[in-house]
Image (spheres, rainbow, N blue to C red):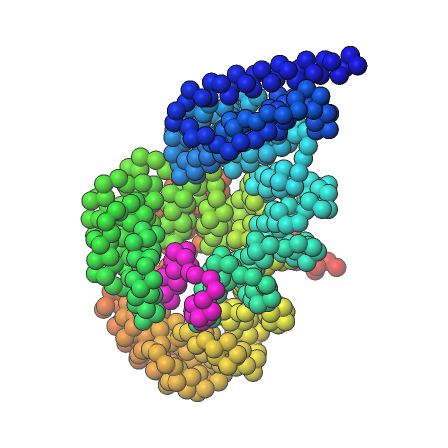
Amino acid sequence: MFCLAAAVQHRVVLFMKMRFHVYMLRFQPWISPPKTITTTRLLLFYERLHCPNTSSSASHRITHSCYSTGTLSEPYFIMGQSRKADKSLVSFNSLITKHGRSGDVREAESVFYSMPSRNTVSWTAMLTAYAENGEIVNARNVFDIMPQRNTASYNAMITAYVKNGCMIDEAFDLFSRIPEHNAVSHAAMITGFVRAGMFGKAENLYFETPVDWRDPVCSNAIIGGYLKLGRFEEAFRIFDGMVVRDVVSWSSMINGYCRAGRIVDARYLFDNMPDRNVVTWTAMIDGYMKDGNFQEGFELFLKMRREGKVAVNPITLSVMFDACGSFTRYKEGIQMHGLVSRIGHNFEVILDNSIIIMYCRLGSLDEGTKMFHKIRKRDEISWNSLIAGYVWCADMDGALEVFERMPKKDVVSWTTMVSGFFTKGLTEKAMQLFRMMPEKDSFSWTAVISGFVNNEEYEEAFHWFTEMLQEAVTINPLTFSSILSASSCLATLNQGLQIHALVIKMNLKSDLSIQNSLVSMYSKCGDLPSAYRIFVNIDSPNTVSFNSMITGFAQNGFGEEALNLFNKMQKEGREPNGITFLGVLSACVHVGLVEEGWKYFKLIKSSYNTEAGPDHYACMVDLLGRAGLLDEAVELINSMPFEPHPGIWGALLGASRTHLRLNIAELAAQKLVELEPNNATTYVVLSHLRSVSGKKMDADQFMMAKKRKGIKKSPGCSWVVVKDKVNLFLAGDKSHAHIEEIRITLLTIGAVMRQLYCHTHEDQFHI
């Protein structure tokens, strides 16, 4: 009874409050009178607003004990105001999110601080707006002062740490403190570990994740990690075991296979995919283009257009423009440009830039320049595209003119110019520009190192690589590939080993491009076991991997092993390219397998629909010449669809010398003199052949002609690396700073060797 009286007393107080609110609302003339409602229903609403724990049955019983009749018209307004408040809160939160995504974080702040009330969603939206715009400190400040936090708030802050510089320790600290995890929490943390290179922790967390949470978000994250490391079989195992797959799952696998050159596997998944989006189509088309198969890629693009289920986007079109330029497909490039104009993407800056580069690569600098001038709002990329176009066409004067007119140069502009000067062999100009750069990044330094390597100035490449290390610049995989190439060309195994150690230290040993470079370096330095060990440890070797190992076997005289590896490559469904066949034919030359050489030479066109190049013909001429089949070699040269280069005639001349075929030697020598009039080797070989055949006077005439023209034979060259410095020696050259010490040392070694030789023979005599 006492409880009931207290409840009635509380209800009376609520009723008086309600009556007061209604009375005050009558003085608001702009509010139209709403429909009527019973006092009982209004009191129920008002009580639930202030006393949410009161049950509906108790409320109804108490109401009937106090009021039996009566009507009021105002309660609808009270409920309407509550709904409007909720809608306003949602609108404010949406507005914060919108401003954050558009990059207008100050407007998002303005909305946030002007809100009359905020909920957890409001705070989380503001946190995310800061994070999306790189203001990670402000994002954490908002997180710290939030009145209440939920799982979504923690997830937003973890994602912010992962995306902004991968602050993995801070992210994991928050992950450990989440009161209640969900699938998004685990996916964000797994992604963070993958990005930070801590894949072991990513794997552990994935397998600790409840099975129901894994698909598809967490599984997608770990698949991305496996693909990044080239561990395709494990990625496919996770993918194959997924109960729920989304378009991201399929697209990730397709893109991963394409990047690894496994086009057949990628196409199989593509054809079996239930739903494709524009990302999937673009990845598959780009995969074909990167694999050198323009026709398949272009036909797939046409199929995408014919089906009409998915519209092309600027990225798809950019891939097509890039391919048309790279494969010099002028007709298709014009068609793509016309398509862009028809479908209304002609004002996309990204496409305009791609069109500029395409025309320049096609050799149409005028068209590229016209396109540049049509762009209304040019950005740095537009200027850089035109500069890159001039560089591509080897017009450095034009590139420099555009570069000097560029209003605001960025690091890409400077790096493009530096690379261009190196490509033209103007190393001094390139270095002058490099030193003038206001800021340099990893790619600028790499441009210098690779520039010196391409100009065969390997010592300079090592010098600037050392400078790069001293400046504490982050080394990227391309840097390692370039400096390993320098080590390969110098055959300096010791330096190659040091670079390999640095690769391991920087946790880049699983990078595919570096692994391929290491295989090539060890092969060229003669350490074939190390090269093969690295090759077999590559999780998913691509065509470049096989090419490096096949070429390594061939160069070191292991022809049969090279051919066996090529057969294995074919069985695994890898498509060989021109470089692959060059290695295979070289292997046939070293082993003397004429029939196999013919078979592989014919296979280039019959099975892979590509044409043999000059270097393939040179290998075949060398193979036939070494086997004494010089007449067949001449027939092959005469059947070539293009003019033979000096290497082909040089191979024929060398074989003619070996087999004493003077008539063919004269033919080859005549062609070589036309192509390389200052090459002394031709005169020396012909003189030797004349002398051997008993025509001493003719031999002397050739040598006199060489002297009369001032042609000198290049001296023999060798080098040795001492304390990271390359010491170069030419035949007859005495200009080395320590030549006397070297001469005395050589004499001493010679004397010791003679003594050892004499003692050995004396011992043998006494025995």
Does 316 lie within the magenta span?
yes
Residues in magenta, as a range: 298-327
The residue drawn where x is 48% and y is 64% is 309
Q: Quarter of the image holding residue 179?
A: top right
Does 659 lie within the magenta span?
no
The percent position of residue 558, horizontal first and vertical second, equals 60, 67
The percent position of residue 642, horizontal first and vertical second, equals 35, 78
Compare residues 427 and 705 and report the one nearer the observer: 427
Does 290 sit above or below residue 609? above
> Does 4 sit left or right of 108 as displayed?
right
Q: Quadrant of the C terminus?
A: bottom right
Main SS category, magenta section = helix
Compare residues 11 and 378 and report the one nearer the observer: 11
The residue drawn where x is 46% and y is 49% is 478
Q: Is residue 436 in view?
A: yes
Q: Quadrant of the N terminus?
A: top right
> Does 30 sit left or right of 761 as displayed?
left
The percent position of residue 644, horizontal first and vertical second, equals 35, 76
Compare residues 635 and 687 and report the one nearer the observer: 635
> Does 220 sit left or right of 610 as displayed?
right
